[in-house]
Image (spheres, helix red, strand yellow):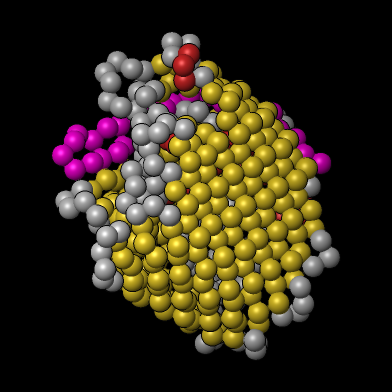
Amino acid sequence: MTPHPRTVGATAVFCLVATLAAAQTTPPAPRPPTPVSDAPAPPPPDPQEVQPPRDQSRTPAWAVSAAASAVYESDVNFNGTPENGDWSQQLQARLSRSFALRRGSVSANAGLSHLSYPQHEELDRLSYDFSAGASYALTRRLSLTASDMFANSYAQDSRLLIRAGQLFPRAITRTNAASGNLSYLLTRSTTIGGSVSSTNVFFEDPSFVGGSGLSAQGTFSKQINERQALGVLGGYTVSDGSTGDIRSLMGTWQGAFGRTVRVSGMAGVRAYSLEGEGRQRYSPGGSFGITATVARYHAVGVNFESLVEQAFGYGGTYLTQRVSGSYAASIGPLTLTSTASYSDNQYLDVEGLRRGGRNLAFDARYALASQLLLGADYEIWTRTETGSPALTTYRTGITVTYAFGW
């Protein structure tokens, strides 16, 4: 499988850190829960990618990796054309930088890759991505976090679109997700906050519809004991195109069980309107997620969410049900990761229309030496649409990565 921004860069750096670390420490006790976010797009890094615990104190400030892959893909255009498989080669370079401030931290990550197909030269592509994040304590009570992510790639490889269950035939897309959050500790057990986030998607193919959205929300969270917190969240989202404004009111809950298990959930109602309608519609919604570290070097995460949002690619608005999961393990020189997602999108402005997407990925990395990694990947995508047969494509391949840090 071709190296993916969520596997090649993050996994290579993680494997490097795991190899350089002489020993790993017991994970610290969870911090008090913080308010659940109802933002329409996740800030990087992807919260669905759960990694095994590692010694953060030994993470290098600079990390560099270069990778070469040989990959077979069963349907390079992802349009159901028979006998449309092809081998491809990919070269990728990635650079990351992180440093600590007196009251916070800053990190940045950039990647560049070139993909070439011997039998489908029209699909040769240079892709790139960039992400950055920062956190800073303005005062002892007031803290600020911010993040931004930009990627230019095929839609099939877009982390943002895969999470939304929106899979497309081979199409070039540019995606951007940015967010900022202010949190104020009102008392020892009460936190209030506000955040703003934006999402932008652009397709080079005019047959697909891009879009953008801006979301603002306010949160209130009350610690009810050492391990649990209850809260209220109110949000407002403005989108372009045919999607009207979306307002949400949610009750939130977060809990920490033992030293390694965290659970969060929210439930409430969303109000929205469709283009050309003069009335409000209401939809119940919410989410539930759990992350856990098992036996120190294994981590697992599961998440479910139900929400109303803008439909990128085809236009319109849909009600979606999503389930996703992840697993990661570090066993000596071997690192294993696996992710899965399922989404069912019911379009609200086209009666009877449903589109969905499924994605399953496996990744293994073995440290041949302190800076040399050998990897094997397998990933499969399936997209569904009312009245049409399901379309599936898969990738499988091997990757050699050289990574170092200082």
Residue 351, position in %: x, y?
Answer: 17, 53
Is 57 contained in the magenta span?
no
Q: Residue furthest top?
A: 119
**How many numbered circles does the render carry?**
0
Residue 130, position in %: x, y?
Answer: 64, 42
Residue 345, position in %: x, y?
Answer: 29, 52
Q: Is residue 140 left or right of residue 4?
A: right
Residue 92, quarter of the rendered image: top right
Q: Is residue 318 visible?
A: yes
Indicate whether 336 appears above or below 71. below
Q: Which residue occupies the foreground of this view, 159 or 337?
A: 159
Tell me what residue is drawn at x 45 percent, y 65 percent.
Answer: 237
Q: Which residue occupies the foreground of this view, 112 or 276?
A: 276
Indicate whether 271 appears above or below 363. below
Tell me what residue is drawn at x 44 percent, y 26 percent.
Answer: 396
Image: magenta residue range: 379-406
Which quadrant is home to the C terminus?
A: top right
Q: Is residue 253 visible?
A: no
Indicate whether 141 appears above or below 162. below
Tell me what residue is drawn at x 78 percent, y 42 percent.
Answer: 62
Q: Residue furthest right?
A: 102
Q: Is residue 395 left or right of residue 62?
A: left
Indicate whether 24 appears above or below 63. below
Q: Is residue 7 left or right of residue 96?
A: left
Q: What secondary structure predominates along the stretch shown in magenta?
A: strand
Tell me what residue is drawn at x 46 percent, y 59 percent.
Answer: 40
Residue 368, position in %: x, y?
Answer: 65, 28
